[in-house]
Image (cartoon, helix red, strand yellow):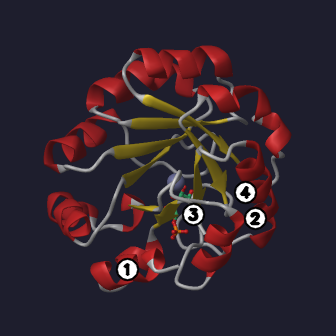
Amino acid sequence: MSSSAVPLKIAPSLLSCDFANIEREVKAIEAAGADLLHVDVMDAHFVPNLTIGPPVVKAIKRVASKPLDCHLMMTDPQRYVEAFAKAGADYLTIHVESNAPLTETLHSIRKHGVKPGLVVNPDTSIEAVKPWLAQIDMLLVMSVWPGFGGQKFIAKVLDTVKAARELAPNLDIEIDGGINGETIHEAVQAGANVIVAGSYVFGGDYAERIQSLRVA
Ligand code: DX5
Ligand code: ZN
């Protein structure tokens, strides 16, 4: 159950959209009820996949009306803060496992007018982000190993979500990976309130799928 302090938000991952028709996809997913647009940035180094960079974020920004939640799966996200801020990112989340000097990079993100967030991989303990919880606008808990859409939900990360929710009752806690009409229940029960879903939402009727996540 998400309390009123932290309303439920659905963030479809554009990784699963039809990139040949990105404007149409953005408009369709917004019309279907998306609250945020989750944009997966991969550098082929932090993760074994390569996706999109600032020019494409800028193009998405031109056609989007919902905030862009940019998840930076990068070894050195600190080098790209300005580029993604200028491209129109509304949130920039960086991995605690990256090389970024966290305090400075989170400051830099905020200084650029963007909401900063931290991300933890499935094996990373909540202890790793504790010192920065007061400095971030969102904590993203990965429920798959980052790199690809369509993977199976890793249930043990629910303990991390629960621990985070206890430490930070009012923080936006996002969960990303393997979310569908089933796994949504345990995710929300554990305390996640920002729900990323790629293959599930884009793999059916967008509005029906978003609604099925919302009723959880
Ligand atoms: C995985 C990405 C996710 C991915 C989720 O590395 O961070 O955002 O798109 O896809 P699904 O919902 O299909 O697991
Ligand atoms: Zn993501």
Between marks 1 and 2, how big is the CA–CA gap?
22 Å
Kind of element beneath mark 1:
helix
Tell me whether the residue at label 1 lies in contact with that at label 4, contact meaning CB atoms closer than 8 angstroms.
no
Answer few, some or many: residues within 10 Å of disc 3's Cα (few below 14, many 20 plus, some between 14 and 19). Answer: some
Whether residue 101 is visible, yes or no, is no
Q: For the residues marked 2 and 3, what is the alpha-carbon distance in whole angstroms? A: 14 Å
Q: What's the residue at 68%, 75% (across, down)?
A: 186
* Real-space Cα separation, disc 4 to disc 2, in angstroms: 5 Å
The image position of residue 26, as x and y in percent, is 22, 60
- The residue lying at 66 percent from left, 61 percent from top is 191
The answer to whether 134 is drawn above or below residue 120 in the figure is: above
Tag on residue 158? 2
Look at the image and tell me whether residue 157 can be seen: yes
- Label 1 or label 3, whichever comes before in sequence order: 3
Residue annotated with mark 4: 161
The residue lying at 22 percent from left, 42 percent from top is 61
Task: Label 3, secondary structure: give it.
Answer: loop
Residue corresponding to mark 3: 2
Q: CA distance from mark 3 to mark 4?
A: 12 Å
Going from N to C along the chain, the mark reached first, 1 or 4, is 4
Q: Of marks 3 and 4, which one's residue comes earlier in the chain?
A: 3
Between the residue at mark 1 and the residue at mark 4, the CA separation in whole angstroms equals 23 Å
Given contact means CB atoms under 8 Å apart, are the residues at marks 4 and 2 in contact? Answer: yes
